Image (cartoon, rainbow, N blue to C red):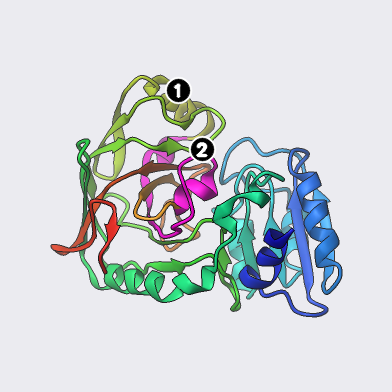
């Protein structure tokens, strides 16, 4: 499959003889084995299968975490994402390149959003990161009623165009984005989530879910599926799971909302709000979960200057 070569070469830059670890669970084992077989033509590839994780951001076993540190590149192919774990952070800190590929399937390997030159987004992704770095406050508004502000003071944005070619880089193709960890207790307003909350319990939304955020944390949830989200936060997370941990801007023009996290987060001109853990992306909130919520057609301003207008990137 061309998509496998895209992942190995375009996105991860696998070199001859490098050590590659693919971490799967029972639901993604076949995908991992398929990629591993192709990778083994050039790299020292090893594919392991761990117990299924319950939620995005759950730590892997100590054994798996230790094995990560013995490799140059890791593909996180478990159904639930390992990107916001300490294990992934430790691996990146020692210079490893990490592809976060949760919920991958044979069907996703055929998806048009993977048939894209991710490197072509590098400059745009960095321009957005620079704008966020230089800003103090960001405002997000949508036609459906989102009216939200948060502080960025002192936080560094990360350009994630879908490639992890340098030491310590992380990528999540087909997701291409720029993200930042806002100041945890300095965000407020209303978020009308109209697209998806990519997890087993929700996915593409039947109707919008409205969140009220005060001092950085969700204090009220309304909508047809509000109870499902409330239950998810209560049973899988804790109080820190309700804190806004991430603001992300999607860049991939080939992605369309479908309920798959890496496709939905990467949809061009969308914003995703990640609630929960951000201690591995420059924040201070160490939570047991990280749940992303995607909003369409946003207008995003940094210190009063538009970088997105009605879902169109203007920077």
Which of the two residues, 293 or 8, is positioned nearer the viewer here? 8
Q: Quadrant of residue 69?
A: bottom right
Residue at x-position 41% and y-position 60%: 251
Residue 314 spot, x, y in % from top left: 25, 65
Which of the two residues, 151 or 173, is positioned nearer the viewer here? 173
| Vertical order, 166 against 259 (above or below) | below
Earlier residue among tags 2 and 1:
1
Of circles 2 and 1, which is in front? 2
- Measured in 3D between alpha carbons, the distance from the residue under mark 2 to the one under mark 1, in whole angstroms, is 16 Å
According to the image, label 1 marks what residue?
228
Residue at x-position 60% and y-position 48%: 81
**With 25 as the anchor, is 294 left or right in this view?**
left
**With 31 as the anchor, is 84 left or right in this view?**
left
According to the image, label 2 marks what residue?
259
Name the quarter where the N terminus is drawn: bottom right
**With 47 as the anchor, is 11 left or right in this view?**
left
Answer whether residue 46 is visible to the viewer in this image.
Answer: no
| SS at circle 1 | helix
Q: Which residues are magenta?
A: 238-266
| SS at circle 2 | loop
Q: Residues within 10 Å of mark 2 (few under 14, many from 20)?
A: some
Q: Quadrant of residue 46?
A: bottom right
Residue 199 spot, x, y in % from top left: 53, 35
Residue at x-position 64% and y-position 74%: 94
Is 247 inside the magenta-drawn segment? Answer: yes
Answer whether residue 280 is visible to the viewer in this image.
Answer: yes
């Amino acid at each position: 499959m061309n998509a496998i070569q895209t992942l190995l070469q375009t996105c991860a830059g696998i070199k001859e003889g490098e050590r590659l670890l693919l971490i799967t669970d029972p639901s993604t084992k076949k995908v991992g084995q398929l990629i591993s077989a192709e990778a083994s033509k050039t790299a020292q590839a090893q594919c392991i299968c761990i117990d299924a994780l319950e939620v995005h951001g759950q730590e892997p076993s100590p054994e798996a975490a230790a094995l990560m540190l013995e490799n140059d590149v890791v593909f996180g192919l478990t159904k639930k994402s390992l990107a916001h774990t300490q294990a992934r952070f430790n691996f990146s800190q020692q210079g490893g390149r990490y592809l976060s590929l949760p919920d991958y399937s044979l069907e996703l390997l055929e998806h048009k959003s993977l048939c894209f030159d991710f490197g072509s987004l590098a400059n745009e992704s960095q321009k957005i990161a620079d704008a966020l770095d230089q800003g103090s406050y960001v405002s997000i508004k949508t036609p459906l009623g989102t009216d939200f502000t948060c502080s960025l003071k002192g936080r560094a944005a990360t350009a994630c165009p879908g490639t992890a070619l340098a030491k310590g880089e992380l990528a999540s193709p087909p997701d291409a984005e720029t993200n930042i960890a806002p100041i945890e207790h300095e965000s407020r307003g209303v978020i009308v989530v109209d697209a998806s909350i990519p997890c087993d319990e929700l996915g593409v939304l039947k109707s919008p879910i409205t969140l009220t955020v005060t001092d950085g944390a969700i204090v009220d949830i309304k909508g047809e599926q509000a109870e499902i989200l409330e239950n998810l936060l209560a049973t899988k997370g804790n109080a820190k799971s309700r804190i806004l941990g991430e603001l992300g801007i999607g860049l991939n023009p080939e992605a369309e909302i479908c309920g798959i996290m890496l496709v939905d987060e990467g949809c061009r001109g969308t914003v995703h709000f990640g609630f929960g853990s951000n201690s591995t992306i420059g924040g201070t909130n160490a939570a047991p979960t990280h749940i992303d919520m995607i909003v369409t057609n946003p207008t995003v301003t940094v210190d009063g200057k538009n970088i997105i207008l009605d879902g169109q990137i203007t920077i």
